[in-house]
Each structure stands twice: as structure tokens, then as C-alpha cells.
Image (cartoon, helix red, strand yellow):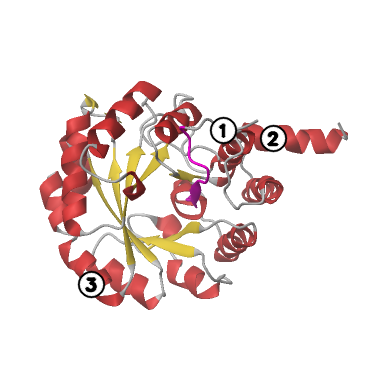
């Protein structure tokens, strides 16, 4: 099947399972398993892997040992290995760990910012000025992430203009890429189109990526809607690793295998080995004793096991 002329011919997948996915696990995932997961993802052709988080283990215990993970992985040329850096201490640790890209963050909802980072949106962005300046000095790529771009667990609906205001702040900081994130997975295709229409009025489409959670089962439709707006970078998590802390029992990040299956059907290139991704999803879920949340992954694995 040929893809629509409105859709991109190639999409970059940012694999967030090792960081955004595993940080939500209740039990600590051993460092050697994290390293093996990242190495398998590298071998499968993922161009950008969110591998670590230099946040205090007191706040996110699952990310303890990130420096060791970054020191142990078998890096491949051309792959971007990213890490979340909340402050200058985190940045210094990320720099020492030879991180290729740092991830900074804010929110499109003022209430969310106050409740989660104890400051206003403006203050949250301002805090990252020294971090971004240091990254620019050291030649490290900077990605900005905007949480709750379509809805907030506290204020409800988030207006496109609110997202646009934070995008402008992130652009002023000098971010190389900006994630438009549906943190609680409430967005629908129409809302996705409205947000991107708002921000593409003043910024290039190449600057943005879509980060969709599948809490309400809308993530693939939302990715398609974003692609129709010209967006060609998307985040996903192998086997759907991760949860949504604001919706009990809900799935979190969209499953990488499901995204790849859709893109494959649309003849959109990713450079990723789809069969390898399915095997990686099976490997990590079996290893940590968690159900595989990827529908495509489960279906293909079942098909193989029955010989159909």
C-alpha cells in the first residue's frame, strides 16, 4: 500500500522504553538488563534511544545507576543516546556520561507545573537557561518536552494557544527539537491537528515531535493526524512499557511495535528492523515479568508460535 502524498516518506522513531518506560516499573530493573535492552535496540536500527535519567534516585529510584548504564552500553555510530536532565547537577552527570542529547521539560498546563515541579511554567523554563547554555557550549543536542499538551489531570482541556506559548519559550531557549506530549493520553486527532496548526503558524515542522500515550486508545490515530500535519518524529516505547500515573491501570506510551506496524503498512521508512523490535518486546516483558502491551507484537508472536 502506498502512503498518502500528505504523509512523510520517512519517520524518525525516538525509543523511550529504557527511560520513560522503565521508570514506571515498581521493581528496580537491574542495570545489566537495561544495558541489554539498549544494545538490542541499537542493533535493531533505532536512531534515537532515550537511555537514562540523571534525576536524584530519591525521586525516581528506577533511574539509579544511569551513569553505569551509559558507560556500559555498546554505542553505535549515528545513534543519539538521550538522557533527562532536570538541573545543572543532572547536566554535569549527563556530560560526564557522554550523553549525545539532553532532555529538558516543562508543561502546557500551569496547574500541572505548580503541582509537579513546584513553580510556574515561566520559572520552569528559566531554570533551564544555564543547562541549555552549557549544552550549547559543549556541543550537546537539546530536546525540550512539553507535558500535558492536550489535557491536564488537574485543569482538564489545554488550549492550543497555551501549548504555543511554551513552544515559544522553548524556542527562545534554543531547543533543537520540541516534544508535544500527551502525558495522560486524552488527546484526539482533531485536537492534535488544532495544536499543530497553532504552532506550525510560526515554527517549522522539522522542530517538532509527537509523544502520545495510549490511555484512551487514541495514540495511533493521533500519530496519523500529526503526520498529516507534516510531523515526522514520534516517540514510542517497546512493548508499550510504562504507565500513566494519572489513570490507574491505564497503558502509557504507545507501543513501538504498533507504530512500526502502521508505518510499514503505509510504506513509510523508519530504518528499524520490525521483526527485531517484536523480539525485543518479547525479551524485555518476559525478563521483567510484565505483560506485553503491544497488540502487533503479541499477534505476531502468537502467529509464530502456532506456525500460521
What residue span does the magenta drawing correspond to? 6-16
Q: Select label 1 or label 3 by which is in front.
A: 1
Residue beneath the point at 28% across and 31% down: 197
Measured in 3D between alpha carbons, the distance from the residue under mark 3 to the one under mark 2, in whole angstroms, is 43 Å
State the residue lying farthest toward the right.
307
Q: Is residue 89 above or below residue 286?
A: below
Q: Are marks 3 and 2 in contact (CB under 8 Å)?
A: no
Q: Is residue 250 in sight in this rendering?
A: no
x then y, percent, for residue 156? 24, 24
- Is residue 233 covered in magenta? no
Q: Quadrant of residue 61?
A: bottom left
Measured in 3D between alpha carbons, the distance from the residue under mark 1 to the one under mark 2, in whole angstroms, is 25 Å
Q: Secondary structure at mark 2?
A: helix
Q: Is residue 189 above or below residue 40?
A: above
Q: For residue 298, which numbered disc appears in the image?
A: 2
Q: Between residue 115 and residue 93, name the one nearer to us.
A: 93
Measured in 3D between alpha carbons, the distance from the residue under mark 1 to the one under mark 3, in whole angstroms, is 41 Å
Residue annotated with mark 3: 134
x then y, percent, for residue 261? 63, 36
Sequence-wise first label, 3 or 2:
3
x then y, percent, for residue 143? 32, 56
Q: For residue 3, which numbered disc appears in the image?
A: 1
- Is residue 11 covered in magenta? yes
Amino acid at each position: 500500500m502506498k502512503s498518502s502524498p500528505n504523509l512523510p516518506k520517512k519517520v524518525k522513531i525516538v525509543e523511550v522504553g529504557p527511560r520513560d518506560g522503565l521508570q514506571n516499573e515498581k521493581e528496580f530493573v537491574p542495570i545489566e538488563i537495561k544495558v541489554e535492552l539498549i544494545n538490542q535496540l541499537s542493533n535493531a536500527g533505532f536512531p534515537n534511544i532515550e537511555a537514562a535519567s540523571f534525576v536524584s534516585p530519591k525521586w525516581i529510584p528506577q533511574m539509579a545507576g544511569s551513569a553505569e548504564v551509559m558507560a556500559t552500553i555498546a554505542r553505535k555510530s549515528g545513534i543519539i543516546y538521550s538522557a533527562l536532565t532536570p538541573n545543572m547537577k543532572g547536566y554535569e552527570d549527563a556530560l560526564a556520561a557522554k550523553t549525545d542529547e539532553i532532555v529538558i521539560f516543562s508543561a502546557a498546563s500551569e496547574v500541572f507545573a505548580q503541582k509537579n515541579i513546584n513553580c510556574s511554567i515561566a520559572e520552569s523554563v528559566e531554570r533551564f537557561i544555564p543547562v541549555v547554555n552549557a549544552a550549547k557550549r559543549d556541543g550537546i543536542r537539546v530536546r525540550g518536552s512539553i507535558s500535558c499538551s492536550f489535557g491536564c489531570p488537574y485543569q482538564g482541556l489545554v488550549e492550543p494557544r497555551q501549548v504555543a506559548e511554551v513552544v515559544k519559550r522553548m524556542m527562545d531557549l534554543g531547543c533543537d527539537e520540541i516534544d508535544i506530549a500527551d502525558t495522560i493520553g486524552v488527546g484526539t486527532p482533531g485536537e492534535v491537528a488544532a495544536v499543530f496548526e497553532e504552532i506550525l503558524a510560526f515554527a517549522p515542522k522539522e522542530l517538532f515531535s509527537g509523544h502520545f500515550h495510549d490511555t484512551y486508545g487514541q495514540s495511533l490515530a493521533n500519530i496519523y493526524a500529526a503526520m498529516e500535519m507534516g510531523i515526522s518524529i514520534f516517540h514510542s516505547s517497546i512493548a508499550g512499557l510504562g504507565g500513566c500515573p494519572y489513570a490507574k491501570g491505564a497503558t502509557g506510551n504507545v507501543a513501538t511495535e504498533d507504530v512500526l506496524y502502521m508505518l510499514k503498512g503505509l510504506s513509510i521508512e523508519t530504518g528499524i528492523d520490525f521483526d527485531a523490535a517484536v523480539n525485543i518486546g518479547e525479551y524485555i516483558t518476559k525478563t521483567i515479568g510484565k505483560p506485553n502491551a503491544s497488540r502487533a507484537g503479541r499477534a505476531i508472536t502468537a502467529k509464530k508460535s502456532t506456525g500460521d
